Image (cartoon, helix red, strand yellow):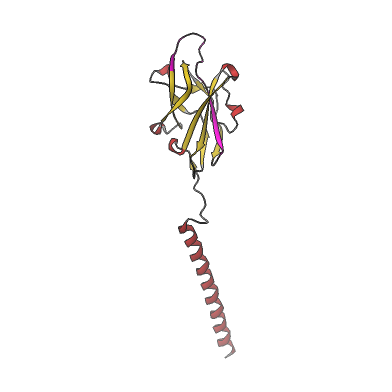
Amino acid sequence: MRSRLAARSTRFVLTAVAAAALATTAAGTSLAVGGQGKAPVEQVCGTADLTFKVTEKTQAGGYLLVTAKARPGITCYLEGTIPAAGFGSHPDRQVTPAEQAVTDTVKLSGSTAAYAGINPKSTNDDFGAEFDRMIIAVAGDEEGATSVRLPSPTLIDKPLSTNWHADPADAVPFS
Protein backbone atom coordinates (compact mmCIF):
# COMPACT_ATOMS: atom_id res chain seq x y z
CA MET A 1 0.00 0.00 0.00
CA ARG A 2 2.79 2.31 0.86
CA SER A 3 4.40 1.91 -2.60
CA ARG A 4 1.10 2.76 -4.30
CA LEU A 5 0.90 6.05 -2.41
CA ALA A 6 4.44 6.88 -3.35
CA ALA A 7 3.71 6.12 -6.98
CA ARG A 8 0.62 8.36 -6.96
CA SER A 9 2.40 11.27 -5.33
CA THR A 10 5.30 10.90 -7.73
CA ARG A 11 2.91 10.96 -10.68
CA PHE A 12 1.22 14.05 -9.25
CA VAL A 13 4.57 15.87 -8.88
CA LEU A 14 5.65 14.87 -12.39
CA THR A 15 2.34 16.06 -13.81
CA ALA A 16 2.68 19.40 -12.02
CA VAL A 17 6.27 19.85 -13.29
CA ALA A 18 5.26 18.95 -16.84
CA ALA A 19 2.35 21.41 -16.74
CA ALA A 20 4.64 24.18 -15.51
CA ALA A 21 7.15 23.42 -18.25
CA LEU A 22 4.44 23.51 -20.92
CA ALA A 23 3.13 26.83 -19.59
CA THR A 24 6.62 28.33 -19.67
CA THR A 25 7.23 27.10 -23.21
CA ALA A 26 3.88 28.43 -24.38
CA ALA A 27 4.58 31.82 -22.82
CA GLY A 28 8.00 31.97 -24.47
CA THR A 29 6.52 31.04 -27.84
CA SER A 30 3.79 33.66 -27.60
CA LEU A 31 6.39 36.31 -26.74
CA ALA A 32 8.49 35.38 -29.76
CA VAL A 33 5.47 35.26 -32.07
CA GLY A 34 4.14 38.56 -30.68
CA GLY A 35 7.44 40.25 -31.45
CA GLN A 36 8.45 40.91 -27.86
CA GLY A 37 11.48 39.25 -26.41
CA LYS A 38 12.54 38.32 -29.93
CA ALA A 39 16.28 38.56 -30.65
CA PRO A 40 17.18 41.03 -33.43
CA VAL A 41 18.03 39.52 -36.77
CA GLU A 42 21.66 40.16 -37.61
CA GLN A 43 22.65 40.14 -41.26
CA VAL A 44 25.23 41.32 -43.73
CA CYS A 45 24.37 44.83 -44.94
CA GLY A 46 22.83 45.18 -48.36
CA THR A 47 22.66 48.48 -50.21
CA ALA A 48 18.93 48.83 -49.46
CA ASP A 49 19.66 48.49 -45.72
CA LEU A 50 21.73 51.69 -45.72
CA THR A 51 21.53 55.43 -46.23
CA PHE A 52 24.54 57.25 -47.70
CA LYS A 53 25.81 60.80 -47.28
CA VAL A 54 28.83 62.38 -48.99
CA THR A 55 30.83 65.32 -47.60
CA GLU A 56 33.96 67.05 -48.89
CA LYS A 57 37.11 66.98 -46.78
CA THR A 58 40.32 68.97 -47.33
CA GLN A 59 42.79 66.62 -45.63
CA ALA A 60 45.21 64.66 -47.87
CA GLY A 61 44.68 66.99 -50.83
CA GLY A 62 40.89 66.73 -50.67
CA TYR A 63 38.59 63.73 -50.73
CA LEU A 64 34.96 62.65 -50.47
CA LEU A 65 33.92 61.11 -47.16
CA VAL A 66 31.07 58.64 -47.61
CA THR A 67 29.04 57.95 -44.47
CA ALA A 68 26.81 54.86 -44.37
CA LYS A 69 24.17 54.29 -41.69
CA ALA A 70 21.65 51.49 -41.22
CA ARG A 71 18.04 52.41 -41.90
CA PRO A 72 15.77 52.59 -38.82
CA GLY A 73 15.08 49.18 -37.28
CA ILE A 74 17.96 47.46 -39.10
CA THR A 75 21.09 46.00 -37.55
CA CYS A 76 23.62 44.74 -40.07
CA TYR A 77 27.30 44.13 -40.60
CA LEU A 78 29.23 46.02 -43.30
CA GLU A 79 32.29 44.11 -44.46
CA GLY A 80 35.60 45.99 -44.48
CA THR A 81 35.97 46.15 -48.27
CA ILE A 82 35.69 49.11 -50.62
CA PRO A 83 32.28 50.37 -51.66
CA ALA A 84 31.24 49.56 -55.19
CA ALA A 85 31.17 53.11 -56.53
CA GLY A 86 31.57 54.91 -59.79
CA PHE A 87 30.98 58.12 -61.70
CA GLY A 88 29.57 57.42 -65.15
CA SER A 89 30.40 54.41 -67.29
CA HIS A 90 34.02 55.08 -68.30
CA PRO A 91 36.53 52.64 -66.69
CA ASP A 92 38.65 55.57 -65.43
CA ARG A 93 35.65 56.75 -63.38
CA GLN A 94 35.18 53.51 -61.38
CA VAL A 95 36.52 53.40 -57.83
CA THR A 96 39.52 51.13 -57.21
CA PRO A 97 41.06 50.12 -53.85
CA ALA A 98 43.41 52.43 -51.97
CA GLU A 99 44.07 49.75 -49.33
CA GLN A 100 45.69 46.37 -49.84
CA ALA A 101 43.77 44.25 -47.31
CA VAL A 102 40.26 43.79 -45.93
CA THR A 103 39.63 45.70 -42.69
CA ASP A 104 37.37 44.95 -39.73
CA THR A 105 33.63 44.49 -40.26
CA VAL A 106 31.51 47.36 -38.90
CA LYS A 107 28.26 46.67 -37.03
CA LEU A 108 25.66 49.28 -38.04
CA SER A 109 22.58 50.07 -36.01
CA GLY A 110 20.96 53.27 -34.81
CA SER A 111 23.40 56.18 -35.05
CA THR A 112 26.50 54.01 -35.62
CA ALA A 113 28.10 54.77 -38.98
CA ALA A 114 30.74 53.38 -41.31
CA TYR A 115 33.05 55.59 -43.36
CA ALA A 116 34.90 55.26 -46.65
CA GLY A 117 37.13 57.92 -48.17
CA ILE A 118 37.25 58.44 -51.93
CA ASN A 119 40.08 60.34 -53.59
CA PRO A 120 38.21 61.56 -56.70
CA LYS A 121 41.33 62.25 -58.77
CA SER A 122 44.42 60.13 -58.22
CA THR A 123 46.15 61.38 -61.36
CA ASN A 124 48.47 64.39 -61.47
CA ASP A 125 47.13 66.11 -64.58
CA ASP A 126 44.16 68.18 -65.79
CA PHE A 127 42.24 65.26 -67.32
CA GLY A 128 38.97 63.89 -66.01
CA ALA A 129 35.28 64.63 -66.10
CA GLU A 130 33.11 66.61 -63.72
CA PHE A 131 30.24 64.89 -61.92
CA ASP A 132 27.63 65.99 -59.41
CA ARG A 133 26.39 62.46 -58.53
CA MET A 134 27.96 59.15 -57.60
CA ILE A 135 26.54 55.65 -57.96
CA ILE A 136 27.25 53.57 -54.85
CA ALA A 137 26.48 50.09 -53.55
CA VAL A 138 27.76 47.61 -51.03
CA ALA A 139 30.35 45.39 -52.72
CA GLY A 140 28.55 42.28 -53.91
CA ASP A 141 25.18 44.06 -54.10
CA GLU A 142 25.80 46.17 -57.20
CA GLU A 143 22.30 45.40 -58.50
CA GLY A 144 20.90 47.51 -55.65
CA ALA A 145 23.11 50.54 -56.40
CA THR A 146 21.79 53.97 -55.58
CA SER A 147 22.65 57.48 -56.73
CA VAL A 148 24.02 59.98 -54.20
CA ARG A 149 24.42 63.72 -54.78
CA LEU A 150 27.93 65.11 -54.31
CA PRO A 151 28.33 68.31 -52.27
CA SER A 152 29.54 70.15 -55.41
CA PRO A 153 30.54 69.27 -58.99
CA THR A 154 33.77 67.25 -58.68
CA LEU A 155 36.51 66.45 -61.20
CA ILE A 156 36.88 62.66 -61.39
CA ASP A 157 39.76 60.65 -62.84
CA LYS A 158 40.86 57.21 -61.60
CA PRO A 159 39.25 57.52 -58.14
CA LEU A 160 40.62 55.49 -55.22
CA SER A 161 38.65 54.40 -52.15
CA THR A 162 39.46 53.18 -48.69
CA ASN A 163 37.57 50.27 -47.18
CA TRP A 164 34.66 50.84 -44.82
CA HIS A 165 35.87 51.83 -41.34
CA ALA A 166 34.21 52.53 -37.97
CA ASP A 167 36.38 55.63 -37.46
CA PRO A 168 36.33 58.42 -40.07
CA ALA A 169 40.01 59.13 -39.33
CA ASP A 170 40.83 55.69 -40.77
CA ALA A 171 39.00 56.54 -44.01
CA VAL A 172 41.44 59.16 -45.28
CA PRO A 173 42.65 57.98 -48.72
CA PHE A 174 46.36 58.71 -48.75
CA SER A 175 47.56 57.87 -52.24
Residue 129 falls within the magenta-colored stretch: yes
From the top left corner, tell me how far across and down residue 133 is, in percent.
43, 23
Count of residue discs = 0
Position of the N terminus by quadrant: bottom right
Residue 148 or residue 101, whichever sits in front: 148
Q: Is residue 102 visible?
A: no
Extreme-top residue of the structure: 125
Q: Residue drawn 55% across and 87% down?
A: 4
Note whether 152 is above or below 34 in the view shown: above
Q: Quadrant of residue 111?
A: top right
In the figure, is residue 134 to the left or right of 60? left
Observer able to see residue 144: yes
Q: State the residue at coordinates (45%, 37%).
A: 46
The residue at 38%/20% (across/down) is 89
Please tell me whether residue 9 is drawn above or below residue 174 in the rendered image. below
Front residue of 154/101: it is 154
> Residue 71: within the magenta?
no
Quadrant placement of the C terminus: top right
Q: Position of residue 145 (x, y in %)?
A: 41, 31
- Image x and y of residue 140, in percent: 43, 33
Residue at the extreme front of the image, as rendered = 152
Up-down relation of residue 106 to residue 8 (above or below): above
Query: Which residue is located at x 56 percent, y 78 percent?
Result: 13
Q: Which residues lie in the magenta part?
A: 111-130
Please state the horizontal and vertical placement of residue 23, each as a whole percent of the image: 51, 69
